[in-house]
Amino acid sequence: MDIIGMDALKVLPFYCVIIPLIASFCMPVLARWKKEFCAPLTTAVTAAVFIITIIIGNHVIKGRAISYAVAGWRAPWGIEILVDPLSAVMIMLISGISLCIMVFSFTAIKYELERIVTGWFYTAFLLCFSGMIGLVISNDIFNMYVLIEIAGISACALVAAKGTRLSTEAALKYLLLATVGSGFILFGIGFIYMITGHLNITFIAMELALIKDQYPILIWTTLSFFVVGFGVKAALFPLHLWLPDAHSSAPSPSSAILSSLVVKVYIIAFVKILFIAFGLEIFHETYIRQLIIVLAVLAMLAGSFFAFVQIELKRRLAYSTVAQVGYVFLGIGLGTPWGLAAGMLHIVVHAFMKTCLFLCAGAIAYQTGRKKVNEFAGMGYLMPVTMGAFTVAAFSMVGIPLFGGFISKYGLALGSLEAEMPLLILVIVLSGLLNATYYFPIIGQAYFSQDESTGDNHGGDKKKFKRDDIPLSMLVPIVIVALGVIYLGIFPGTILKFINLTVSVLL
Amino acid sequence: MHDYATRVVFRYMLLFVLLYGVYVVMHGHISPGGGFSGGMIIGLGLLLYILIFGQLWNMSFRRMILDSAIIFVGIGGILEVLKFIIPHEHGPIGVPGTLFSVGIISVSNFGIGILVASTILGVYYMISEEE
Amino acid sequence: MDLELILLNFPYVVAIILFSMGTLIVLTQANLVKKVIGINIMETSIFLFFIAVGNMHGGVPPIYDPAYPEALYVNPLPSVMMLTGIVVSFSVTAFALALIVKLYIYYGTISAPNFMKLK
């Protein structure tokens, strides 16, 4: 893969980080003056970034990565931005999903948040957005740490924005554990800097390949520090304790952002450090691979079990995220071309599915105020479009063919055959069945059972479809994201082409 | 804090603390020091003053500090960002040991100093006026 | 383990001990303010570690002096990185304290077991 530098094009990834950052600095001042302008401005910024990322993606898919030295300082000393195909697909995903969520938040924020914190919500969102994009495209590990902190602290602010008892408590828990996690990451970065003297990932890889035999214990320590740090951040199973509280008590646009994007960008950063900086040899020599696979299997099973016993819909969705993070880590742990590609594809698919589910949960709470999973009787007739999108996403979560989740799970199964661990297929199937046990009752209830609570005065038309009573700004993102899930299930080729371009370089 | 000793000692110390902060800010570019450390000293000095002598300033002045913190953070952030956008524009190198020999950097150091000091006070007010 | 080796790498040993202490305090203490103090201890140990990495025996502070053009300078990069780290630590502390004040208003206590339960 040759790295080219066309002058106009190579600055574009930098603008993806800078434009939301400047907008976020302007937002508190704007919020003092006119609160109504915050949401449209944020949406406009997100849309602009989305267009830029599509231009970048169009270029990168030809197989040429974009490299840019920030402020003209060259690679070993300055901060380098490197957009490889995997980063390109991730920034397109982040900006696209964020755009949908921002359109959704037009009315949802008015309903869920107090008016005073509106400006701060959008400030935190834009900071988180630019932090996520920067984290994906940065090639400098200390810069990565700074962006991790920006994304992490503003994600806590997104949780705390609601200001209720539960959300404040969850935000504090998230903040404390996330800070412990980033402390571990920073310590790992310190170890890497100590043994290599570089902060740029490309140069670390070159240096580590030379000296890795001299420091076997230190490399072990560094890797375990990174696994713990990114594990806390990405909610790998035994370290997931902050996730259910934070994701379920946040306002629903925040939950969608947190669950579909924030958790995933840390995984991308981990993949970059693990496969590019440390390289395949260290990955196979140390036992890091077995560790990740064991944790991933635990996450897939335990996350689903925990999700099964939850009553509240958003908590169930949050625990489902724990299980899905397990799938992604399983792909990383397999370390075969199909396995890693499927893991990365699952990030994309899960972002669409979980956004759809959380937005549907928000829409249902907006129209009917129901938040428990046993209150869904007759919902399929009350809100047909929303519930249809929910059904699509839930089917995809279970892994039924024609939906996105099937492709990534199929890929994971192929990957575990490639890695000669056929027993893992059993785990994947079992986890899929567990997914079915906690999603299908909701859907079945929504379509096939009577609504006793509201339906007695107009008894006859109980099974008649009504129109959703939610504003268009909530309906359109839900439909778009649901269509995205179906598109990924039928035509996964484009995304897989992006991912395979990177995976073929990594492995 | 109504301790007599702290009040007397700090009444004489405050000016020196602030002076030291300004000194550190002024030496920020070509000799050791900097806007961040100096601004931290100024901010903590003012914070200590508030803690010892109580809330002497009225509500509108406190609001003003909060607002100025927000606006300074915004302006400072945008300036920092612009520094990265324009490549190879690092200004004159300056003469070691002399103040104000590097043009725009000494000015921006003062900006950073005010930013940090107002941020510390802003954070304090934000926490203390939550109730 | 050689005693000499430990003495030579004294800052690293202290950093690791402080890091473990900080993590233990965050995870085990019930008082929320103590948890925040634990985070500060943890981050400070990382700062110590980084600055120890940048240190060089016999090095002088990296300030250019025309009189000694070829002096051995200490690596300033880790110290500069830790300036960023201090800012991050400061903002985390401020945010955590703001949240604790809010929780104190809600619950009337800052002891975690009274309200932070596994659900």
Image (cartoon, rainbow, N blue to C red):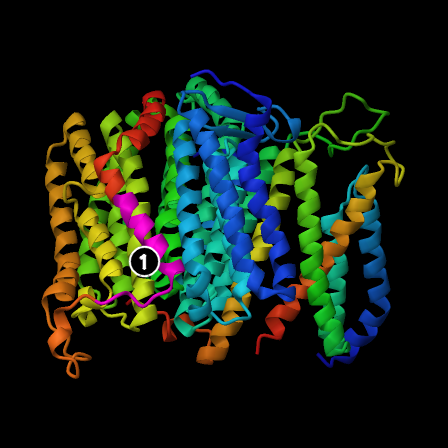
Query: Is the stretch drawn in magenta largely helix, strand or loop?
Result: helix
Q: Quadrant of residue A283?
A: top left
- Identify the image quadrant of residue A326: top left
| Residue A324 shows in this picture | yes
Quadrant where the N terminus of chain B sits is bottom right
The residues colored magenta run A466-485
Secondary structure of the residue carrying numbered label 1: helix
- Observer-nearest residue: A126 or A156? A126
Q: Image height check: is A104 above or below A422?
A: below
- Residue A80 on image: x %, y %: 55, 29
The residue beneath circle 1 is: A358
Measuring from the top left, give residue A91's x and y in whole percent: 44, 38
Residue drawn at (24%, 50%) of the image: A323
C94 or A53, which lies in front?
A: A53
Q: Residue at x 62, y 65 (%)?
A: A34
Q: Chain of mark 1?
A: A
Q: Is residue A428 left or right of residue A93?
A: left
Measuring from the top left, give residue A167's x and y in whole percent.
41, 67
Name the spot of residue A171 as percent of width and height, x first. 44, 63
Q: Residue at x 64, y 30 (%)?
A: C56
In this rendering, does residue A225 appear at all? Answer: no
Quadrant of residue A297 within the rendered picture: top left
Number of numbered discs on residues:
1
Residue type, label 1: Phe
Q: Is residue A145 magenta?
A: no
Residue in the foreground of this view, choosing between A301 and A447: A447
Quadrant the C terminus of chain B occupies: bottom right
From the viewer's side, name the closer residue of C113 and B80.
B80
The reply, left or right, for residue A277 in relation to residue B103 is left
Circle 1 Cα neighbour tier, 10 Å, few/some/many (<14 / 14–19 / ≥20): many
A334 over A186 or under it: above or below: above
